[in-house]
Amino acid sequence: MTARPAPPPASPAEALLARADELRAALTGNFRDQLVQALYEDAETIARRAVKPVGARRRDWDQALDRLVTSPLFGLPLMLALLAVVFWLTVVGANYPSQLIATALFWVEGQASALFEAWGVPGWATGFIWHGTFRGLAWVVSVMLPPMAIFFPCFTILEDLGYLPRVAFNLDWLFKRAGAHGKQAIAMSMGFGCNAAGVIATRTIDSPRERLIALLTNNFVPCNGRFPTLIMLATVFVAAAFPPAFASVAAAGSVVMVVVIGVLFTLVVSALLSRTVLKGEASAFTLELPPYRRPNIGRILYTSFIDRTIFVLWRAVQTAAPAGAAIWVLGNVFVGGESLAQHAANFLNPPGQAIGLDGVILLAYVIAIPANEIVVPTMLMVYMGAGMMTADAPSFEALRALLIVQHGWTMLTAVNLMLFSLLHNPCATTILTMWKETRSLKWTTLGALMPLGIAFLVTFVTATAARLLGWA
Amino acid sequence: MTDCSSCPAHAPLAQMDLDVSRFDYVVALAGNPNTGKSTVFNALTGLKQHTGNWPGKTVTRAEGGYTYAGRRYKLVDLPGTYSLLSASQDEEIARDFILFGQPDCTIVVVDATCLERNLNLALQVLEISDRVVVCVNLMDEARRKGLEVDVRSLSRDLGAPAVPTAARTGEGLRQLLTTVADVIEGRLTTAPHRVRGNDELQRAVAQLLPLIEHAAPDLPNARWVAMRLLDGDHRVRQALLNGELAAIAQRQREAVQRFSRKMALEGTQ
């Protein structure tokens, strides 16, 4: 029989913790509830002594507005209508300035390259700098800048007005049905700006399960980097398929459709996750509807122009220039009679065709992993760089001609490209943010590959269906 | 003027990835979501962080600086939260910064149009720190809504200075800066309101206080630590076991000593 060793003397900290545990167990009620109640009582007393209503209370127009905007009947349709108006303004307004910028930039290209020739600069250098890189950038600026300059201020006005929490309120019951947290609607709205920001915004969700769901599905709403692509496709393809009177309405409607599809995928995937790998009940929360505030025009112009338009454009230009160089190399290094770009595009062509796209588009998506902004420019540069230069000034009309006449795009290509753009893997920044937020290889990988898988699946289904029905 | 990076009081801030060199004081900015906290931050620092009209705009920490009366202040914008009691990440960031970061002063921004709900957080901050200035923001909106806020009554009840502001137009911001400087440099003393709670709660807290004094002497917010322990807060338990809390008290003592030495030397303050 051995003597039990005496327990080591407890440190003051351990003694304190032990006593705290005893006291907590001895309390009759829940400590947290008692404390919160005490806090509220004190806050109420102090506030009552400090705040006095003076004069007649003015008519509360914002409550009346809230009743309309968040009403079960009108809330959702009103939201869609607002979205449609914003896109419509963008589509209608972007066309003319777009052509103006294009004409100006092409004039610069012509003058500069003539100057280079006069100076005796070798032809390949003139070609690389002016007809390659600069022309690529000219496309980016003229096709992307005008839509962004209209879309972003509109979006910022809605944001500063205080509309987004109302959106969250309207969508709350849907997220609840999906077994997800209502605050996910706010993180999702942030995603319309930038998915990386949306992923960070999930921090406000305190349940880890629901936070992961929000984080993994944030990518299903198109971000600022992808909206220009969607709007451009809508303008070039959807609008052209309708009589001129309905063209812009149809284009705006199709972008709204894409957004609705994105929200549907967010909900369906959230529901699947919360019933499989991330099982659990939705938790309750309070959502504050802030007062409507008159947006500050100077601030809106600053935010939407400097923070958003120039930011997105600069990211596109920054990544488009090296991408342009890479594409130039891919297009000009020949192996076995074909350029590297053609080899890569040929290799990617079968899977590309299977989902209604082509090898060049998939190649563009591979090159554009760092930033979604450059998908269209990359695609154009690959099309043009592989000896398929177009001499037309970049306008929506010329773009149509290039894609449809020279590269055989159909309505199916456009629709599937919109879907693929909506659903495919997040950009490198977002993936990195997922990793930083979760510190988990498993969830980051799932967050990157699950959307990609869904994008392939959905576009494969639509392509196959369209072909079977003889539409494409 | 001392270089902040070298003094031990700011060592934990440096650990929190905060660059404190080139600054004399560190000021934290706390508040409920959507009280115009980011507008106050921008107005004071001249930065152009985007301020969106929705709760939860600031989920990370934004930092900026300003100079006032020859002193350089570092301003840290904490995530907007309704309370510091729950376990969500934004609340933890705010709580940890105020408790372990030990800023020289914490500005709590409250919304004048719904004071009662906002005071809940202000009272919690006052439990943790006694160097607090309450910024009663959105005074213009309150006036429009026909509400009058008696700031003197509020200051008296909270035991900390309250300053009325309308950050969007810049109203009251100068007064805010003066008050922050006065609190930091000891020209204004505070006597923070402490939540008492019912008898049972008070008795339990009273029983823990001597033990806390034994484990981490001279802790400025022992009552709050007692309440967190009674609530079973893991982070505070851990801080007690690994000596973080005792270190806070130690740094406070050193700061006080340094301050009185400085006063003796300069003969002013």
Image: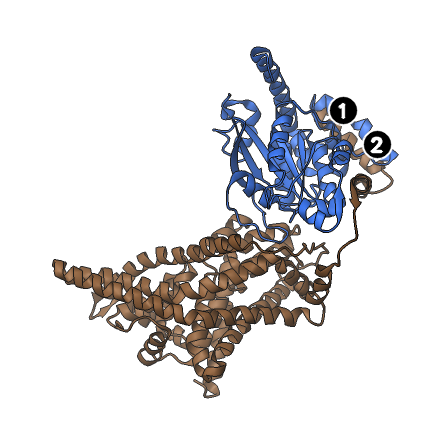
User: Residue lying furthest front in this view?
Assistant: A55
Q: Which residue is mark 2?
A: B202
Give the left or right position of residue A76, taking residue B262 as reference.
right
Quickly name the residue at label 1: B211
Locate residue B196, reporting x and y percent. Answer: 82, 33
Answer with left or right where residue B40 lies relative to residue B129: left
Q: Residue A37 versus residue B123: which sits nearer the camera? A: B123
The nearer-to-camera label among 2 and 1 is 2
**What shade does chain A have?**
brown
Percent x, y for residue A239? Answer: 45, 78
- Please, which chain is the residue tagged with disc 2 on? B
x 73%, y 51%: residue:
B145
Crowd around label 1: few <14 · some 14–19 · many ≥20 (10 Å): many
Image point 64% across, 49% down: which residue?
B34
Q: Position of residue A68 (x, y in %)?
A: 70, 67
A184 w.r.t. A95: above or below? above
Task: Report whether residue A309 is seen.
Answer: yes
Q: Is residue A216 visible?
A: no
Q: Colour of chain B?
A: blue
Say which quadrant the C terminus of chain B sits in. Answer: top right
Residue sitting at x 27%, y 73% = A390
Q: Amino acid at mark 1?
A: Leu
Disc ID at residue A293: none
Real-space CA distance between mark 2 and mark 1, rounded to the nearest whole angstrom: 15 Å
